[in-house]
Amino acid sequence: MPRDPDAFLAIVEEQTLPPVIACGGVERVYVDDVIATVRRRALEGGLPDFNHDRVSARDRPFVDVVALANTLPMMAPRRLVEVRDADALREHDVAALEAYLRAPARETVLLLLFAAIDLRDKVIKLLDHHALLCRFEHPRERDMPQHVARRARRHGLTLERGAVDALAATVGADLTLLERALEKLALVAEAGAVTAAMVESHVADTHLEDAFALARAVATGDRAAALRSLGALQGAREEPIRLLGLLAWQVRQAARTRALLDDGHAPNEIGRELSLYADRLQAALAAAKRGDGPAHAARLTLLARADRLLKGSRQPPWLVMHRLVLDLCPPAPRGGVDAGPSGPPRR
């Protein structure tokens, strides 16, 4: 059984459909994806109205489902038998299910839909050995960036890294909210390209506005503003690891701008290269000029070390973040010259 939704969905979406597919779990967005994809692929090239049976396991014994599955398709290469409430399959259905799994109809795709999947259940164990089975659970917040990228591809969108982090910061681990956000972005994205600025303009909530304010303050070295934004985000119970991704995007952008400046590129050329214009280009140029190439590299090192601390140490996450912001925004020395990063977060 594929433990990763990516592996399961890759089979359902791209490979030959297996004769028996089963899925379920708390994350219904993925279940709905499977239903839509299997319907489209199993019924293409035929007459859907005559080759699609939808039944509930609460209302029909499995022997009836087997009879439907063994019916030949009408003027089509395949037929689809979709069984809702598969949790209702009981001990007396096991024999019929096992017999069908050992010799499934080649012309039929049997789709079993569960509300929940208990790996200890006898029916589930049977399907695990003889069918394509997946349990969809709520994603962990630290895994949200990969879910954001995956869901965006389904909408035909290409997200820059900053946009991925921004969306993960605003929707948390809620894939339903992510779907709504991606639907909004699909309406405004030219050629499907989505930037962090577009997320800020069209999707941002109060928490995300605070997160962008934090990223901008860090980029410009405004220690007081950065600490105010960080305090607001902590009060709102934001996740530090997601904020780190947004900070990393902002600092990487400043580092790339610095590198282009050092290579002799004019500001308008840098704007075209990085898709930055007007006020955003000026902000990136100002952030880039705060330090030379090694100084920006040191800031990226600070972020990488903070990432390791957040993921692998027992230090309080918000303590790591406060130290990181202080290190990224050192106080300017007398005379007003920027001091640059003060060193890595303390271990």
Image (cartoon, grey):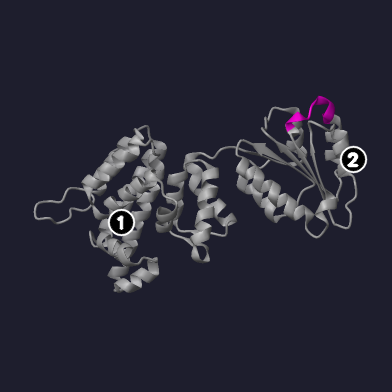
Q: Is residue 244 above or below residue 160?
A: above
Callout 2 crowding tier (Cα within 10 Å): few <14, some 14–19, many ≥20: few
Which is more toward the observer, 183 or 163? 183
Going from N to C along the chain, the mark reached first, 1 or 2, is: 2
**Amino acid type at image mark 2:** Ala
Q: Position of residue 10 (x, y in %)?
A: 65, 52
Q: Is residue 271 above or below residue 88?
A: below
Q: Residue at point 33% right, 55% down?
A: 251
Task: Tell me the quarter of the picture where residue 96 sits.
Answer: top right
Number of disc labels: 2
**Amino acid type at image mark 1:** Ala
Q: Position of residue 78 (x, y in %)?
A: 83, 53
Range covered by the magenta-colored residues: 87-94
Q: Residue at point 55% right, 48% down?
A: 179
Q: Is residue 95 visible?
A: yes
Task: Tell me the quarter of the picture where residue 21 sits.
Answer: top right
Q: Position of residue 237 (x, y in %)?
A: 38, 35
> Which residue is denoted by mark 2 in the rendering?
67
Relative to 23, 110 lies left or right: right
Q: Is residue 125 visible?
A: no
> Which residue is denoted by mark 1 in the rendering?
297
